[in-house]
Structure formats: C-alpha cells, structure tokens
Amino acid sequence: MPVLDTALTVDLLNDAGARANDPKLQREKEGWILNPAVLAGQPRGRQFSPTIPLTVAKIDVVAMIREAGLTRADEVADYFIRRFLRVPLTESRRQIVVDVLTSGIGMGAIDYGQPNLETSLREALHVLMGMSEYQLA
C-alpha cells in the first residue's frame, strides 16, 4: 500500500473500486447535481422563461409538389433546391436531401396517397434549410 503522506494512507486499488461500486459515494462525488439550489432553480427558470409551443408552418408542401407535377424523389429534391436556395448545392449535398426524402417515403416514386408524405417532405425540407447554403440565401 503506497503512502502519500505520513498521516494519510491511500489504497489506490480498493478505494477506486469501492468508489465506483458504491452508489452513496457516487452521489457524494456528483453532489452538485443533487444540490437543492439547482432543483429549486429549475421551476423558477421555467416560470420566467416558459416553453414556446411548436407551431408548424402553414405551407401545404404536398400541394406544392403536386402542382409542379413531380413524381420522383430526385425531382422533388431539385425542386426544393431551386425554390429555397440561391446558391447551388454540390452533388453530394444534393444526394443527402434525396436520401432523406427517399428513406422518408420508402421508395423513389412519390405516392400522393401516402399518409406520411407531408411529414417526409417537411423532413427533407428541414434538412435542406439546415445546410449552410440555405443560410447564405
């Protein structure tokens, strides 16, 4: 057993193992998480900054692509790129939008009767709007 100080003996093997396996010692080590001030501050913080409810944009994306006469996922991706971007996308970044759309609708063709089509189109549009090229527009 190593001695670091004459008054303090440390058993590195057992102390580390005991601390890792003892929930009480873990709570003491992570006591800042259980601090009453933190727990009391959370509701007070919510009181002064209430959550903002999610509102969905009032855009009918399905009607938009239906009016454009689009039938394939890659056509929809190109349409979104032309409509919402002012800077061109590289082929690899365009493919990301196509892949998100294809995985969302489950195929390469657009089925206007599919119940989750609006959600899939919005997901692809969300990915497109998260790209740096959209930020430059």
Image (cartoon, grey):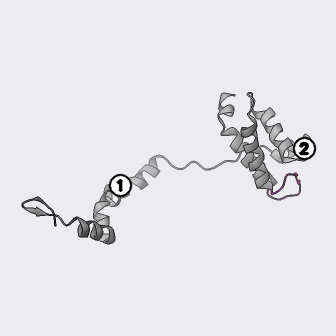
Q: Which amino acid lies under the numbered mark 1 shown in the image of this protein?
A: Val
Q: Which residues are magenta?
A: 106-115
Q: Position of residue 55 (x, y in %)?
A: 67, 48
Q: Quadrant of residue 42?
A: bottom left
Q: Is residue 131 left or right of residue 104?
A: left
1 or 2: tag closer to the N-terminus:
1
Tell me if residue 58 can be seen: no
Q: Secondary structure at mark 2?
A: loop
Q: Foreground residue, 36 or 65?
A: 65
Q: Is residue 31 left or right of residue 9?
A: right
Q: Foreground residue, 134 or 2?
A: 2
Farthest right residue in view: 69
Q: Is residue 5 left or right of residue 62?
A: left
Q: Position of residue 119 (x, y in %)?
A: 75, 53
Please, is residue 117 above or below residue 15 in the view? above
Q: Nearer the viewer, mark 1 or mark 2?
A: 2
Please, is residue 33 above or below residue 130 in the view? below
The residue that disc 1 covers is 38
Q: CA distance from mark 1 to mark 2?
A: 53 Å
Q: Which amino acid lies under the numbered mark 2 shown in the image of this protein?
A: Leu
Farthest front residue in view: 1
